[in-house]
Image (tube, grey):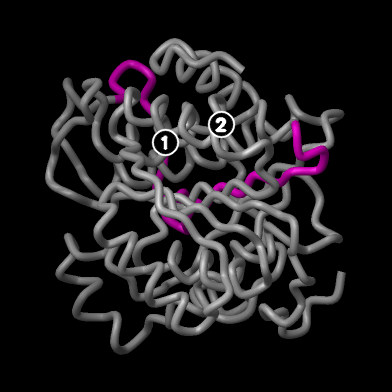
Amino acid sequence: MTDDKWTEKNIPDLSGKTAVVTGANTGLGKETAKVLAGKNAAVVLAVRNTKKGEEAVLDIKRQFPESVIEVFELDLASLNSIKSFSEAIAEEYSKIDYLINNAGVMVPPYSKTDDGFELQFGTNHLGHFALTGHLMPLLKAAGDARIVVVSSGAHNWGNLNFNDLNWEKREYKKAAAYGDSKIANLYFTYELARKLKDSGIMVTAAHPGWTATDLQRHSKLFSFLNPLFAQKPHMGALPTLRAATDPEAQSGDYFGPDGKREMKGYPVKVQSNELSRDEAIAGKLWEVSEELTRVNY
């Protein structure tokens, strides 16, 4: 695999392919959707705010007037919304070639999802776990689909407490909870890659490094430091795009920026921490996730 300056120019024509991108109305998701649309994939923007989604479509179409893009409502903090979205997609599409699990919330004040899960764990991990399970028949129908899970360098702060996943017994620490949701993303990636080993479906992960996006609106520190250190969304989206389209990628690969501490730069294969690769924890999280979401693969 050559790692010198991988960019969207490395992505082949994607005519005939269908991509679903969660959280695609702003930031990294929108940038990812725009590049895929520009490569002639049919793109579904799976978004909570459909008005913002339609604005994103208009914006992308200004650059790629012939692109095929649709907006579907999806609230990852609601298991009912995830089910409804999946049923609506199945009515319109016969296959999904790329599922980009990109949406997320970062360090918000303590709150819960519709189903009573701590918001970050419930949205970032459980929401995507349920969504991927519901969409599995369409992914299998593609023959060689790819699932990309967007994690973060914040997985290094993660250490799941299975006795209190929803932070009901401990003092809430929003950065630690965010780290928990991001290491959960990696447990999910690696466990799903093992389970789909002989299916033809590839599962990869990516992280954007330090990228200035709307995701950080709850953090005054990030808002202050972004102009000094952050890279632009078009660079932050490249690891996700490489994870989705690089023909040399392997299931279980993790991509991030090549710069110092993986904060910025061009996408290369990187290594997540040792804890994130613990198969026993991944297996336990899988069982708990099936139980909590009532979605079985």
Q: Which mark is residue 90?
A: 2
Given the image, on which type of amino acid does mark 1 rest?
Asn
Is residue 102 or residue 21 the one in the foreground?
A: 21
Q: Which quadrant holds the C terminus? A: top right
Q: Are marks 1 and 2 in contact (CB under 8 Å)?
A: no
Is residue 287 or residue 277 the one in the foreground?
A: 287
Asked if the stretch drawn in magenta spans residue 148, the answer is yes
Point out residue 63 in the picture as x, y percentages from the top left corner.
50, 84
Task: Say what secondary structure mark 1 lies in.
Answer: loop
* Residue beneath disc 1: 159
Which residue is the extreme one toward the bottom?
Answer: 228
| Horizontal side of residue 48 vs 235, given as left or right | left
Point out residue 271 in the picture as x, y percentages from the top left corner.
66, 56
Residue 55 higher or lower than 250, as above or below: below
Residue at horizontal 71 percent and vertical 55 percent from the top:
17
Q: Residues within 10 Å of mark 1 (few under 14, many from 20)?
A: some
Q: Which quadrant holds the N terminus? A: bottom right
Is residue 282 or residue 59 the one in the foreground?
A: 59
Task: Say what secondary structure mark 2 lies in.
Answer: helix
The answer to which quarter of the image holds residue 187 is top right
The answer to which quarter of the image holds residue 136 is top right
In the rendered structure, which segment of residues is drawn in magenta?
A: 141-165
Residue at horizontal 47 percent and vertical 76 percent from the top:
61
What separation in Å lies between label 1 and label 2 (alpha carbons)?
36 Å
Residue at horizontal 36 percent and vertical 68 percent from the top:
56
